[in-house]
Amino acid sequence: MTKSSILARLLTAATLTACAIAPTVASATTLPEMIAQNPAYQARWKAITADVRATDREIGYVKNLSGPVLPVQTINIEGRRLVVGYVCQISNCNGNNVFAAIEPATGGIWAIHRRHLDVMPRYQFFGNPDKLMKSIIFKQMTDHDERLREESEAMQPPTSRNR
């Protein structure tokens, strides 16, 4: 077998693999879109949020994924390919939001909901994540917070100390 035929086979295999995976992730740009486009994800999301009352003003958006969103991102951690996404409560994104991870290979979905009550935030996990998954979605949340802080600081006018 020549080098060019080996390369051609590898490229064909890579193309077929990418085509098989792409419709699940590439066609969806947000968490609500990704779940809406896949009946298995819809059923899983419905199951893990079954205890959430859709009429609850403070958390109802979690059940139906209604609210401001950010584009999903694909991450690889410990050999696992995950798609992570975000949705928040309208007019209260800093105080009430959800971060979710979807593992396309298994159809698993896990999420963390954060709601600020008075001063202390309250966290609730969905989907019974193991310790690793809890740390992954919690890190997504804290990374998001850090990016917001950096963007906010960058928009502030310089102070006399910074001059």
Image (cartoon, grey):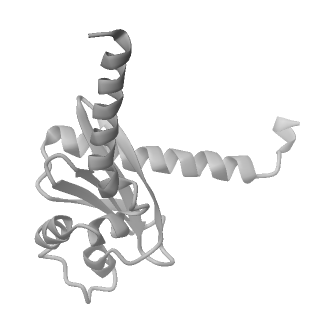
Residue at 35%, 10% (x, y): give it. Answer: 3
Residue at 12%, 44% (x, y): give it. Answer: 130
Q: Can residue 34 be seen here?
A: yes
Image side of residue 102 versus residue 85, left or right: left
Count of numbered badges drawn on the protein: 0
Among all residues in the image, which is located at the extreme bottom?
55
Q: Position of residue 24 (x, y in %)?
A: 29, 56
Q: Closer to the camera, 31 or 92?
A: 31
| Quarter of the rendering containing residue 150 | top right
Q: Closer to the camera, 102 or 141?
A: 102
Q: Position of residue 138 (x, y in %)?
A: 31, 47
Among all residues in the image, which is located at the extreme top?
2
User: In this picture, is 11 found above or below 117?
Assistant: above
User: In this picture, is 11 found above or below 23?
Assistant: above
Q: Position of residue 56 (x, y in %)?
A: 27, 85
Residue at 14%, 58% (x, y): give it. Answer: 127
Image side of residue 64 versus residue 87, left or right: left
Q: Position of residue 152 (x, y in %)?
A: 65, 53
User: In this picture, is 65 found above or below 139?
Assistant: below
Image side of residue 85 versus residue 68, left or right: left
Say which quadrant the C terminus sits in. top right
Q: Closer to the camera, 74 or 23?
A: 23
Residue at 33%, 18% (x, y): give it. Answer: 5
Q: Closer to the camera, 99 or 81?
A: 81
Q: Can residue 115 be seen here?
A: no
| Quarter of the rendering containing residue 143 | top left
| Quarter of the rendering containing residue 54 | bottom left
Say which quadrant the N terminus sits in. top left
